[in-house]
Amino acid sequence: MCDSIVFSLFSDLHWREGDWASCEARLDAIVDRAVRSGAEFAIHCGDFCHDVAAARAMIAKYAAAPLPTWHVMGNHEFECSQSLGEVLAAFSMPRDYYSFDVRGFRFVALDDNFHHGDGGALKHYADESAWAKCHQEEVVLPPDQLEFLREAVASAPGPVCVFSHSSFLLPPESGGVANGREVIRAADSARAGRPVLFCNGHYHRNELVVRGGMAFFDVNSAASLTWVDGEHHAYPPEIMAKCPTSSHSFLNSHPLSAIVRMTMDGDVEIEGMRGGYFCGVDPEALGFDTADRAGRHVDTDILSAKFSLRQPSRLP
C-alpha cells in the first residue's frame, strides 16, 4: 500500500452578520466529517466570511477544531476590512501565501486577490472599495507568488496540492486568473513528474478537469448556491427577515465539503457529497439564469471521483 494522505476541503462558507445560512452548524458538520474521515487537516479555499472583525467567534471555532486548520483568502474576506494586515491578523497568518509539508506531501496556498491599478502597478483588493472587492474585474497572481510556486513545486519531496480562491484553468474572460496559463506552465515545468492537484473555490461550481499529471478541482460552496441580480421572495418570510441579502441569494440544503485522499504515486480519490436546494427552492425553476461567466449552472453537489496523476503532462 502506497503512503497516502487524507484532508478535508471546503470553500465559500460566506458567514456574515445576520447569518441566515446556519454557517456555524455547517462548519460543525464539516469539521465532524473531517474527523470521522481521518483527515489530517482541513483547509478552505476562501470566502470564509464577509467581515473578519465580526466573524471572530467563527474564526475561533475553526481554529479550535480537533485537527489542524488552514486558510486561503478570498475576495470577500476583505469586503469590510481596511487592509491585508487586518485579515492576516484575524486568521493568525504570517503572510498571505505559504506552504507546508505533511509526510512527504507539499501543500501550497496562494493569494490571487491582486489586479493592475492605474498606471499598471499591481494592487491588492484589500486596498480597494467594497464594491471592487466584491466585483473583481481582473485577478492576477503576482510575480513573487509565481516564483514561490515554481520553487515550492521544484523542491517538493512528493505530490503537490495548490490551493487558491480563483481558478488558474478558467480563461480570464470567464473569471479566471489573468495569468493563469503562466501559473500552470510554471508548475508543469517545475514538477519533474510529481503529481500536482490544483483546488479553488470562488465560483460556487462543481467541476474536475484532469490533464496528464495535473488536475484542477473547482470546489462548490459549502453554503451558497448562487447570487442573482433580481429579487425573489421564495423562502418563508420568517427566514428571509433574518438577512436582507436573502432576497438575492439561494442556499444549499447541505454543508458541502470534500474528503481528498492522495497517494505518493499520484492516485487521487475525491469523496464528495450530495446536496440539495434549501427549502426545495430551485432558482432556475423560478426563472433565474444561474450560468456563470463560463456558462456553468448551479449544482447542489460536490462530485466524487477516482483518477491517477501518474501520466506525464499533456498540456498544449
Image: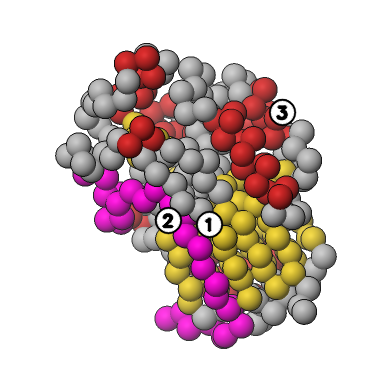
Membership of 303 in magenta stretch: yes
Q: Are marks 1 and 2 in contact (CB under 8 Å)?
A: yes
Question: Of discs 1 and 2, which sits in the foreground?
Answer: 1
Within 10 Å of disc 2 (Cα), the crowding (few <14, some 14-19, many 20+) is many
Membership of 288 in magenta stretch: no
Judge whether 3 appears above or below 111 on screen: below
Residue that label 1 marks = 272
Near-viewer residue (169 or 103): 103
Mark 1 or mark 2, earlier in chain: 2
Identify which residue is drawn at 54% across, 30% down: 23
Judge whether 212 appears above or below 67 on screen: below
Is residue 97 visible in this depiction of the protein? no
Q: Are marks 1 and 3 in contact (CB under 8 Å)?
A: no
Near-viewer residue (289 or 272): 272
Tag 3's secondary structure? helix
**Could you tell me the amino acid type at mark 3?**
Ala
Magenta stretch, main secondary structure, is loop
Residue at the extreme left of the image, as rendered: 287
Q: For the residues marked 1 and 3, what is the alpha-carbon distance in whole angstroms?
A: 26 Å
Q: Which residues are magenta?
A: 289-316
Tag 1's secondary structure? loop
Q: For the residues marked 1 and 2, what is the alpha-carbon distance in whole angstroms?
A: 10 Å
**Could you tell me the amino acid type at mark 2?**
Asn
Report x, y in % for residue 191. Answer: 65, 76
Residue that label 2 marks = 206
Mark 1 or mark 3, earlier in chain: 3
Mark 3 or mark 2, earlier in chain: 3
Judge whether 235 appears above or below 117 on screen: above
Residue that label 3 marks = 60
Report x, y in % for residue 51. Answer: 55, 24
Q: Is 279 positioned to the left or the right of 97 in the image? A: left
Identify which residue is drawn at 69% across, 79% down: 265
